[in-house]
Amino acid sequence: MRISHIRNARAQEVGTVTMAKPLFTINTCRTDCKSISCSSSSSSSSDLSFDYNNNRNMSQTRTSATRKGDLVFVVNPKGANGRTGEEWKKLLPYLRTHLGQHRNICECLTSGPTHAIDITREAIREGADAVVAVGGDGTLHEVVNGFFWAGKPVSAHDEGNSHTTALGVIPLGTGSDFARTFGWKNDPHEAVERISRGLRTRIDIGAISGESGEPHYFLNVADIHLSAKAGYYASRYKQFGNLCYVIGALKGFMGHSNQDLRIKINDGDWELIPQVTALCIGNAKFFGGGMKITPNADPCNGNLEVVILQNFKWYDFVFRMHKLYNGTHLSVENVSSRSVQSIEVEEITGSGSIYLQADGEHLGFLPRKFYILPSAIELIH
């Protein structure tokens, strides 16, 4: 497999990685791609870091009677205040032991926003067996978006229609909310075992119509208004771990006012929803560091769950926070839930100030349309 011309958001070439079967050859990238390093499964831990000073090319080869496929690990080394990079280095020997015998292993370190998207697209085009997101929900969000291009799934160049690249997850970030839906522990060794078994299932993906016409994709939860505003602020305090969500909530409440919104379900008629505090659209169940906000969501059922909180005051969150975390809030007054295939949301006033986020990533402001893509990706589970 040849991974070439990985590009950033401005379509500038940033590097070339070459893999050949059954030989595994590493070409570390040129000076414009220092953050990407790729290794064979037989290299030592120290071989996995790029020599920034000398910009040397490293090569390792390994032969094997059988090769089951190429695994591309997309790692955000700066995630969780650098903890992701440190934990990844510790995990590598275990990963090589359990996967290296029958896999080509490629490690790609992201250098900034959207880089994981570009790496993923190129890996899929070149026929990778799986792309594994290593980090938190932010890295996973980018990898999922890399499975699509111009509103369509990315496909391999030479493998034919029968080849499918799967999504893998090694949770090492701050939130790791998607893993909670499947009951996965925040244990990287357990994640490697899942990848080793290689069991696959088809999962749904949420999509959001963009202002430019290009869809944006989410795996977990998209949300609107207070929760999205709180998430926007929380992202600025990731250095405090899960405490960032508390800080974000406090800052989000400053100057907050509930807003009247209009929604259209499954391309039906417009409905007025008064005094909306937050509107959450779940493909999976959790967000905000373990809050079970859309408890009936199932990423395998072909629907999105919409949960609407109306006319909440700050003290409502204080007294009902435990219900939001354990998923029993649907019985609370002013909380409603419904299952949809699509929902359009717009504000009444047209101020353009209602926040929107998906998987914890700020995406701008209303209006937007959200819809489900059933069975869109294969997940290693």
Image: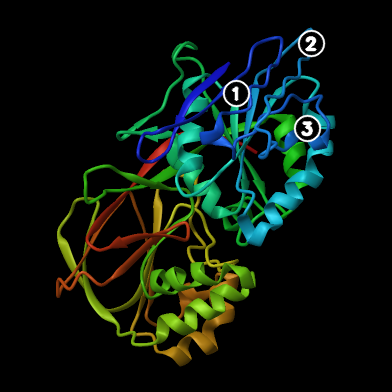
Question: Which of the numbered marks, if any, corresponds to residue 64?
Answer: 2
**Which amino acid, mark 1?**
Asp
Going from N to C along the chain, the mark reached first, 1 or 3, is 3
Q: CA distance from mark 3 to mark 2?
A: 20 Å
The mark closer to the camera, 1 or 2, is: 2
Instruction: Give the side of residue 375 with respect to residue 354, left or right.
Output: right
Disc 3 is placed on an element classified as helix
Q: Position of residue 279 (x, y in %)?
A: 36, 68
Residue drawn 72% across and 20% down? 59
Going from N to C along the chain, the mark reached first, 3 or 2, is 3
Chosen colour scheme: rainbow
The reply to whether callout 1 and callout 3 are in contact (CB within 8 Å) is: no
Residue 274 in sight:
no
Residue 323, compared with residue 379, is above or below; it is below
Instruction: Give the side of residue 128 with respect to residue 224, left or right.
Output: right
Q: Quadrant of the N terminus?
A: top right
Number of residues whose C-alpha sits closer than 10 Å to that of mark 3, classed few (under 14), some (14–19) or many (20 or more): some
Question: Which of the numbered marks, if any, corresponds to residue 129?
Answer: 1
Give the residue at mark 3: 47
**Which amino acid, mark 2?**
Ser
Q: CA distance from mark 1 to mark 3?
A: 23 Å
Towards the viewer: 377 or 174 = 174
Disc 1 is placed on an element classified as loop
**Which amino acid, mark 3?**
Asp
Q: Extreme bottom residue here?
A: 315
